[in-house]
Image (cartoon, rainbow, N blue to C red):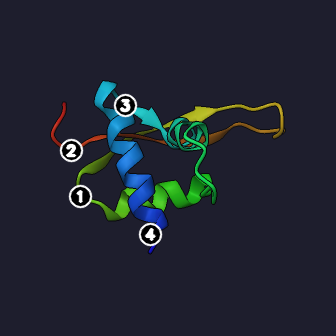
Amino acid sequence: MGRRKSSVITDIAFEVLQSGPKTSHDIYDAIRATGYQYLPTVREVTFALKADRRFRQVDKVVVGTALRSRSHSVALWGLNNNR
């Protein structure tokens, strides 16, 4: 039987965040790099991390992309036990 999508997200996010805070998009890129078959969206990453007490939202950062005409804010995540 397969694992839930949220548990895959939180497991990979925990490994990625060991080195320091990352954005939701950085965590999405790490999941994509593992070759996971059913990729979550960046919003699903944010929702999965909000539901898990091991993670906390450190801040919101404003990013700009070539695909959007305006900049937008993205959640910056860290581990709850790190400062």
Q: How crowded is mark 2: few (under 14 residues within 10 Å), some or many (20 or more)?
A: few
Q: Residue at x 75, y 32 (%)?
A: 65
Q: Which of marks 1 and 4 is nearer the N terminus?
A: 4
**Residue 27 location in percent, x, y?**
50, 40
Q: At label 1, which amino acid type do we have?
A: Arg
Q: Which of 19 and 63 is in front in this view?
A: 19
- Quadrant of the drawing holding the N terminus: bottom left
**CA distance separating discs 1 and 4:** 17 Å
The alpha-carbon separation of the residues under discs 2 and 1 comes to 7 Å
SS state under label 4: loop
Whole-number angstrom distance, CA of label 2 to CA of label 3:
11 Å
Residue at 30% in and 60% down: 52
Mark 1 nearby-residue class (10 Å; few <14, some 14–19, many ≥20): few
Residues marked 2 and 1 touching at CB (< 8 Å): yes
Residue placed most toward the observer, 44 or 11:
11
Q: Which mark is drawn over residue 21?
A: 3
Q: As displayed, is residue 80 above or below residue 64?
A: below
* Circle 3: residue type: Pro
Q: Report the residue marked by disc 1.
A: 53
Identify which residue is drawn at 54% across, 44% down: 31
Discs 3, 4 touching: Cβ within 8 Å: no
Query: Mark 2 near mark 3, Cβ–Cβ under 8 Å?
Result: no
Rate crowding at label 3 as few (under 14), some (14 to 19) or many (20 or more) other CA atoms within 10 Å.
some
User: In the picture, which quadrant includes the C terminus?
Assistant: top left
Q: What residue type is labelled 2?
A: Asn
The residue wearing badge 4 is 4
Image coordinates of residue 51 in percent, x first then y, are 34, 65
Q: Kindly report which numbered mark, 2 or 4, lies closer to the viewer in this rendering.
A: 4
| Quarter of the view holding residue 22 | top left
Image-based side of 8 in relation to 80, left or right: right
Q: Name the residue tied to disc 2.
A: 80
Query: Distance between the Cα atoms at labels 2 and 4?
Result: 22 Å
